[in-house]
Image: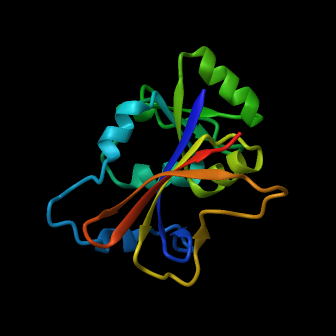
């Protein structure tokens, strides 16, 4: 199963403020109302796995944005609300076991989202591709995209582009 991270972060490497707020992402000028390739990316994946905090942020948007199945990685949340049961489900356990279970459900390409979830996948060397869009803002503190690892993870830059004159979207593939 392929696993891909698709995320935006500040120049100093934060994906959200300390309180989880992503308000700074809403300040990005977007005169062409572009999704910067996100819908094309979503066409490549079969499912999404995210942590509980990210799931709660998505729920707060009011309208469910995904057409692909969402798997919420949580040790505290036992189930999603009834209105989301056909859209999302809670998964628990070790990551290799969860991936094996999702693969048996027909998931071939998984989108990995959420700070701690991404960090957990990286710690277990379970990420194949990272698509990171750098936003030209320095937050100074917040929730970091990366955390401490016990070994290097070597990547290859496969594509980079400038979007809207300010954003830099780079794609990295895991070297194995």
Q: Name the image quarter holding residue 93.
A: top right
Q: Which residue is found at the position 79% from the left and 59% from the top?
A: 149
Q: Which residue is found at the position 39% from the left and 65% from the top?
A: 168
Q: Which residue is found at the position 63% from the left and 44% from the top?
A: 174
Q: Is residue 31 visible?
A: yes
Where in the figure is residue 63, as x and y percent of width and height?
30, 46
Where in the figure is residue 153, as x and y percent of width and height?
72, 52
Q: In this orientation, which residue lies closer to the viewer: 141 or 8?
A: 8
Q: Name the image quarter holding residue 95.
A: top right
Where in the figure is residue 69, as x and y percent of width and height?
45, 29
Residue 20 drawn above or below residue 153: below
Q: Is residue 35 left or right of 118 when viewed as pictured?
A: left
Count the numbered circles shown: 0
Quadrant location of the C terminus in the rendered image: top right
Q: Residue furthest left?
A: 32
Q: Which residue is found at the position 29% from the left and 71% from the top?
A: 28
Quadrant location of the N terminus in the rendered image: top right
Residue 53 drawn above or below residue 175: below
Where in the figure is residue 86, as x and y percent of width and height?
42, 25
> What colouring does the structure picture have?
rainbow
Q: Residue furthest right?
A: 150
Q: Is residue 66 visible?
A: no
Q: In this orientation, which residue lies closer to the viewer: 145 or 81?
A: 145
Residue 88 drawn above or below residue 159: above
Q: In this orientation, which residue lies closer to the viewer: 40 or 83?
A: 40
Q: Name the image quarter holding residue 135.
A: bottom left
């Amino acid at each position: 199963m392929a696993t891909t991270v698709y995320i935006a972060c500040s120049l100093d490497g934060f994906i959200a403020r300390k309180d989880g707020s992503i308000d700074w992402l809403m300040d990005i000028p977007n005169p062409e109302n572009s999704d910067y390739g996100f819908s094309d990316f979503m066409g490549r994946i079969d499912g999404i796995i995210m942590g509980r905090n990210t799931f709660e942020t998505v729920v707060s948007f009011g309208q469910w944005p995904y057409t692909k199945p969402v798997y919420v990685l949580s040790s505290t949340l036992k189930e999603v609300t009834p209105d989301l049961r056909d859209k999302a489900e809670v998964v628990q356990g070790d990551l290799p076991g969860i991936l094996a279970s999702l693969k048996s459900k027909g998931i071939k390409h998984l989108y990995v989202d959420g700070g701690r979830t991404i960090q957990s996948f990286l710690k277990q060397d379970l990420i194949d591709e990272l698509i990171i869009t750098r936003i030209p803002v320095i937050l100074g503190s917040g929730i970091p995209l990366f955390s401490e690892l016990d070994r290097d993870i070597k990547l290859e830059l496969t594509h980079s582009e400038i979007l809207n004159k300010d954003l830099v979207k780079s794609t990295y593939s895991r070297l194995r």
